[in-house]
Image (cartoon, coloured by chain):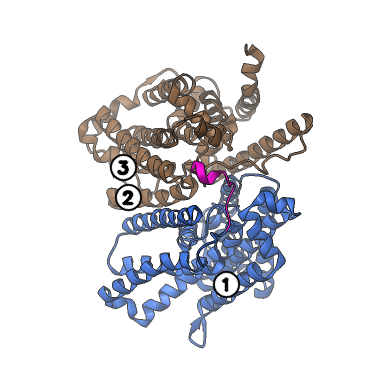
Chain colours: A blue, B brown
Amino acid sequence: MSAETSAASPAVALPRHRPDWLLPLLVLGPAAAGIIIAIIVTPTFLTSSNILAVVRNASTIGIVAVAMTPMTLSGNFVSLGIAQTAMASMVSFVALLGSGWNQALAIIVVLIGTIAVGGFQGAVVGAGFNPVITTMAAGAIIFGVVSEITRGQIVNVNEHGASWGGGDIGGVPIVVIVFVVFTAIVTLVMSRTVIGRQTILVGANRATAETSGISFARVTVVAFVIFSIGIAIVGILEGAAFGEANAMSFANLTISVIAALLVGGTAISGGQGSPLRSAAGALLISVISNMMVLNDFTPGGRLAVQGAVVAAAVVILDMFRRRGLRR
Amino acid sequence: MKVSYFDRVRPYALPIVALAITWIVISLITPTFRGEASVYSVLEGFSLVGLVALGLAFTLIAGEFDLSVGSMTALAAIITVLTSEAGLAGCILIATACGVVFGALQGFVIGWLGISSLVFTIGTLIMLRGLTYIFSGHAPIIIENFEITDPMLLRFSIFSVSSIIALVVFVAAALFLAYTRWGREIYALGGARNEAIAAGVPRVRTITISFAISAGCASLAGALAATRGGSAAPQNYDDLLLRGAAACLLGGISLYGGRGTVLNVAFGVAILSVVVSGLAARGTSASLVQLVTGALLLTVIATEYLAGRLTLRKSGGSRRPGRTRRMAGAGG
């Protein structure tokens, strides 16, 4: 925070003198160019099975990244308990199916349970607690509870087979359809509803928002509920695809989702960004990691590059925002 | 202005009471957690979680947040094992120096660009973890010449070599924060950033120093752990950030910057260490320990929040706490 910009704290809304689409274009443009070059040097990328794998992976990350965008937009940073919450949804869904529950009933119960856990965290954060610490602590508690209950064992659906999570409708994987529909819904909610606009205003300038009568607590709870719905969807889809789960499922999800959100260009301080950008970020992150797999990068190498991409994207986006403010 | 003895002790009252209660409760319910052995294991906590929490406290006091400490510790442990040819002191120093240099670089970028440290360190958290896997060749590695780590196994009643080193670092850090100009500047920047900058506190230098110390402490913790165990694994220390942050907040370091001392960190580490080693003495699983740590962390932020509310109400302030305060690491 430099002296000249901090006077306008906590955060300044959209820069005035240039169009809103310029910023994402400046990031996604070079990224797209890089991907095209990478595709040319990596011929195996364009095989249909590989593209399907990339899109599937992007959809899983994307659903959560899109779901988390309202949270970040409202100025509540990111959740550090993503992987644990998704794992808990997946494990409980699989366990419910395994004990002979009806699928629809299991879906509803898992959805309600995940929303309750997330909504509670939202209420805590809405009361004024630090979101990073709250979600990190909640993640640790969720992981501890699930590990204790499952005793570190793998939970599976037994004879009550369920494999529709990995299926497709007319050649398009279900997870991709869900991703597209979910992104469209969240985008509409953020741009066309009162609560959506309130969320962005709270993130852009909390003091102004509260003075004009917008409840920070309410906005925060709604953002956490949207986040929980996304998490539950991913947990259920993965559970229905694999039929088994344990406490270590989704180990890398937190990192990928935060990376997608940040690379997509949603400002961490709130008020700037959109679910659509997070979806694009998820696609970008998946393409990059797939490209590295095809080019025989080790898992460590992939992590290192992913981290460097996040750090670089954050720095570049921040510099552009700052320049926009100085003008 | 003379500060009375009571005012000086007051910030530590809550942690002291918490430490006393946890110690009594844990030792009552755990017969194996009593006497010299229990003090020894609590002090051992200072050499891993303690050092990480100490480093984290420097960034928290400066009003920033270093999320990369867990990965830094893992990387330093790998570097220590890889450079073990340099001897015991040599490899610990090399690993710590690498950490300090990386931390200074990271702090310089954050301070110079004025970027949110919370976001930037998420990037480096991922990157450092990747480097850890690359350097270790994706598998646990051991110190081949195991004789050089022998001194680490010495024990002097309640102290080990690593807990002595950790305590020395704690004392040095306390003196640095309390009595040096650079130390006071860290408080100034975290307490009231705009005012501090207006008064001439150099932002870039101060943030660089706090991140260098943060990564340095995390690296030293990793180096000590690697030499104690004679090995290092790339997937280690995933939950160290949680434990370090829990220790800081348990002891009374403020999340909003500018508040807390090294003594606060020490009390926090002691409380967490009593709980964790007490549970370990009962044979509790690692995941349950993580559960308890998370629950402690939530209790602590709830207490801090409610205490802040009560003080404001008493002083007649209508402003609600946590509403307009800038959270650590939020940046521009």
Dominant secondary structure, magenta: loop
Residue type, numbered disc 1: Thr
Residue type, numbered disc 2: Leu
Q: Badge 2 local density, few (<14 within 10 Å), some, or many (20+)?
A: many
Mark nearer the viewer, 1 or 2: 1
Q: Disc number at residue B131? A: 2
Cα gap from disc 1 to disc 3, whole angstroms: 41 Å
Image: magenta residue range? A1-13
Q: Is-magenta flag for residue A9? A: yes
Instruction: Indicate the secondary structure of the residue bearing disc 1.
Output: helix
In this rendering, the answer to whether A165 lies above or below B147 is below
Q: Disc number at residue A200? A: none
Same subunit, labels 1 and 2: the answer reads no
Cα gap from disc 1 to disc 2, whole angstroms: 34 Å
Q: Residue at x 77, y 29 (%)?
A: B315
**Displayed quadrant of residue B304:** top right
**Displayed quadrant of residue B210:** top left
Nearer to us in this view, B35 or A302? A302
Mark nearer the viewer, 1 or 3: 1
